[in-house]
Image: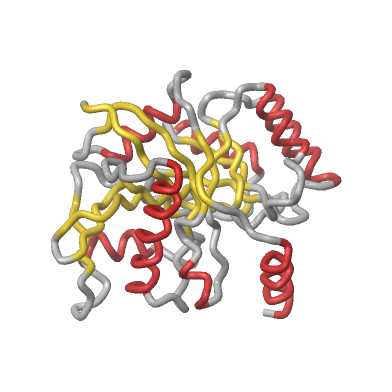
Amino acid sequence: MAETKLIIDGHVHIYDCYDLDRFFDATIENLDKAYLSKYPGDYSAHKVIFLTESKKNDYFSMFKSKGRFSDKSEYTFANTKEDSSLVLLKNNQPQCYLFAGRQVVTKEKLEVLSIASTLKIEYGLPIEEVIKRIFDNNGIAVLAWGVGKWFFKRGDIVRDIIERYHSASLFIGDSGSRPSLWPKPQLYKIAENYNMKILLGSDPFPFPEEQSRVGESGIIIDGPFNINTPANSVHDILLSFKANVSPLGTRDDIFRFFKRQIRMFRA
């Protein structure tokens, strides 16, 4: 397998209010823009979207079963040799890889992501049970940051999980919606002391204009990559002790952050 660079948005939702043509146009454009700002003129990297779907959505299965989302769209999907990945094409030209994944809300009202996997886990289970199920499925579990969710009692729970489960298969999930001027959360620093990796993603909200944010934040990794089994390749790269996970793209400014939070509160 050839060594290659991969551009990954590590936390992507698709909502019913999105125009999927605009969503995928923005995704490709944003990932390219973020990558080329660091590596001008280099068009060799593969682009990847980690879907982290809620219990209400399963766009990945729809894309896989139908091969498209609209007869009028130039976008279609091609299967790989694994169940957990698809190739996104535009006019039959490969654009990026799309990986299955879920976002699980635990009993403690914390969020755990199961990435590059078709595993489905019901909501409301204790966080340790959710992580155990992901690990038992040979998956990667991500402790997803959220506004106000890592303080007080829930913060103590996250700290305890980090200190007791700091395996190569447990990641910290950062979000492009966390303002750039905010200091790095203390729990990130604790995780980094255990050599845990941080997975950054755009984490768009359920408003139509948010469809343009996907791909603005993510990571760059490199390693051996098989186009027939891309999710398995990325899984192995991320778990490698040699893996260098570099942040990519931009974060919210304070104005956009508070505007989004107020709108979520009013929704």
Farthest left residue in view = 92
Task: Give the left or right position of residue 242, taking residue 70 as reference.
Answer: right
Name the image quarter holding residue 176. Answer: bottom right
- The residue under the point 36% across, 35% down is 234
- The residue under the point 50% across, 64% down is 213
Q: Is residue 194 above or below residue 81?
A: above
- Nearer to us in this view, 184 or 83: 184
Farthest front residue in view = 40
Whole-percent x, y for residue 92 in the image:
13, 61
Task: Give the left or right position of residue 207, taking residue 182 as reference.
Answer: left
Looking at the rendered structure, the number of numbered marks drawn on it comes to: 0
* Applied colour scheme: secondary structure
Whole-percent x, y for residue 180 in the image:
68, 51
Task: Give the left or right position of residue 114, taking residue 232 as reference.
Answer: right
Farthest right residue in view = 152
- The residue under the point 29% across, 48% down is 85
Pick the quarter of the image with the C terminus.
bottom right
Task: Give the left or right position of residue 130, taking residue 66 as reference.
Answer: right
Pick the quarter of the image with the N terminus.
top left
- Nearer to us in this view, 107 or 168: 168
Q: Is residue 160 above or below residue 253?
A: above
Name the image quarter holding residue 162. Answer: top right
Whole-percent x, y for residue 121 in the image:
50, 49
Whole-percent x, y for residue 172 in the image:
61, 38
- The residue under the point 60% across, 28% down is 196
